[in-house]
Image: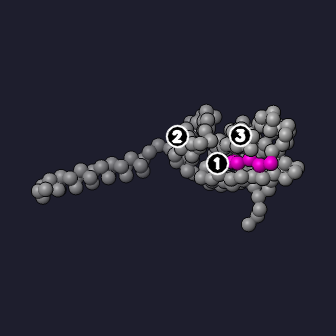
């Protein structure tokens, strides 16, 4: 390859690199209203949760979500899971969709959420069988994690404080 061809190749690569950097640094952030719409219409699947959340909510907002479950309880036909949320999602006052899966094979997406500062209580409506028979555990899928919560005889789970 001649020196002239090598210089052209290097110049093209440099231009592409600069355009990529410029594009990434100047991309428009998703508005809060647009993010709210995405959260409301999101329907992630259990098997593909992480990728679905990134595709439906946005890769950057999904990556910014940080939180961990601190307690959970079953009350009648509802499962309540309390999360301590940190980072930008606290200020957004939005609840990123989470999934729960029970031992009966049912998968649930939260049907609502109550936000109180940095605590978000996710609400899942259980099937009639799950509510009637009670659940020993549920698996949760939330950004970057999957965790099993094992309930007491009273239908309560609390995180171990480390």
- Would you say residue 134 sits in the magenta stretch? no
State which region is magenta.
136-141
Whether pointer 2 and pointer 1 mark residues with C-beta atoms closer than 8 Å, the reply is no
Asked if residue 23 can be seen in this view, the reply is: yes
Which element is circle 3 on?
A: loop
Residue 125 rendering spot, x and y as whole percentages: 77, 36
> Who's the residue at 84% across and 48% down the image?
155
Residue at 76% over, 58% down? 159
Q: Secondary structure at mark 2?
A: helix
Residue in the image at 70% along x and 48% along y: 139
Going from N to C along the chain, the mark reached first, 2 or 3, is 2
**Residue wearing tag 3:** 105
The residue indicated by pointer 1 is 142
Q: What mark, if any, has residue 55 been given in the picture?
A: 2
Q: Is residue 119 above or below residue 76?
A: below
Q: Residues within 10 Å of mark 2 (few under 14, many from 20)?
A: some
Tell which tag, 2 or 3, sits nearer the viewer: 3
Compare marks 3 and 1 and give the one earlier in the sequence. Answer: 3
Quarter of the picture containing the C terminus is: bottom right
Label 1 element class: strand
Magenta: main secondary structure equals strand
- In this view, 148 is above or below 108: below
């Amino acid at each position: 390859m001649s020196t002239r061809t090598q210089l052209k190749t290097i110049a093209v690569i440099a231009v592409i690199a600069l355009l990529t950097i410029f594009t990434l640094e100047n991309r428009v952030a998703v508005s809060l209203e647009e993010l709210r719409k995405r959260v409301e219409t999101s329907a992630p699947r259990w098997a593909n949760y992480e990728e679905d959340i990134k595709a439906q909510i946005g890769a950057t907002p999904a990556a910014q979500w940080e939180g961990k479950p601190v307690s959970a309880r079953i009350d009648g036909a509802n499962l309540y899971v309390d999360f301590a949320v940190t980072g930008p999602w606290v200020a957004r006052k939005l609840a990123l969709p989470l999934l729960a899966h029970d031992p009966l094979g049912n998968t649930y997406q939260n049907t609502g959420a109550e936000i109180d500062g940095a605590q978000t209580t996710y609400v899942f409506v259980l099937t009639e069988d799950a509510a009637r028979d009670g659940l020993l555990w549920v698996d949760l899928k939330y950004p970057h994690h999957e965790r099993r919560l094992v309930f007491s005889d009273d239908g309560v789970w609390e995180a171990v404080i480390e």
